[in-house]
Image (spheres, helix red, strand yellow):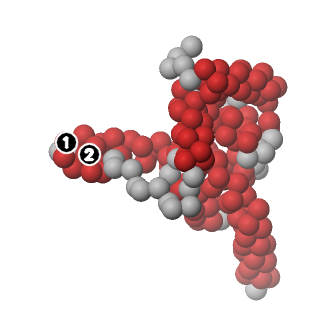
Amino acid sequence: METVAGLVGMTASFHDCFVELFNRHFPRLYRYLDRLTGDPELAADLGQEAFVRLFRRGSLPDAPEAWLISVAMNLLRNERATRRRRERLLTPARGALAHADPAPSPEATAEARDARARVRRALDQVPERERQMLLLRAEEYSYREIALALGLHEASVGTLLLRARKAFRAHYQGGSDGF
């Protein structure tokens, strides 16, 4: 009986920790994924799936935020690979329809759209790892969390972020297509 009671206590404790982690970190993970993908629905799906996988795991890893980022990034890579396979299978007419941009919302201004597009273009020019670092840092992930999520040494994160910021600024201000 004590063992069952102990397990129930651990399950409730995990549940409470999970709920607290979700409430504190889902919005930040979502914003990171939204900025990375430019697709709010995909970002929400990836963030939710990462948390579902954590819940199914049944225990918290040592660095849950970094674990969630890693899982979300793996899910994003899988999603992108699936989309590329589907695009190859689509006929040209269907492919064009699948990539049609939705109409902008009425309340969006031309200036805001231009700024977002300019930031997106500059981000797209920055190498993937640097883009991830910039977006994680923009969401106030610590150097340690960034290092764990991207498999880097914590001591090198500051230098790498500085380089990433310089590359982003060069693309944003100059609008160049490469270095």
Where is the N terminus found, in terms of image quarters? bottom right
- Residue located 73% across and 66% down the image: 23
Where is the C terminus found, in terms of image quarters? top right
Within 10 Å of disc 1 (Cα), the crowding (few <14, some 14-19, many 20+) is few
The x, y position of residue 45, in whole percent, is: 51, 60
Q: Nearer the viewer, residue 177 or 20?
A: 177
Q: CA distance from mark 1 to mark 2?
A: 6 Å
- Residue located 62% across and 33% down the image: 131
- Residue located 47% across and 56% down the image: 104
Within 10 Å of disc 2 (Cα), the crowding (few <14, some 14-19, many 20+) is few
- Residue located 34% across and 49% down the image: 100
| Residue 175: image tag | none
Q: Quadrant of residue 96?
A: top left
The x, y position of residue 55, in whole percent, is: 63, 65
Residue at the extreme bottom of the image, as rendered = 1
Q: Is residue 98 above or below residue 149?
A: below
The x, y position of residue 163, in whole percent, is: 71, 20
Q: Quadrant of residue 13?
A: bottom right
Q: Are marks 1 and 2 in contact (CB under 8 Å)?
A: yes
Instruction: Name the element at disc 2.
Output: helix
The x, y position of residue 169, in whole percent, is: 68, 25
Task: Answer with left or right where residue 53 lies relative to residue 145.
Answer: left
Q: Amino acid at mark 1?
A: Pro
Q: Is residue 58 above or below residue 153?
A: below
Answer yes or no: is residue 61 visible. no
Q: Which residue is mark 1?
A: 92
Q: Is residue 106 above or below residue 91?
A: below
Q: Which residue is mark 2?
A: 96
Answer yes or no: is residue 112 visible. yes
Instruction: Name the element at disc 1.
Output: helix
Residue at the extreme front of the image, as rendered = 110
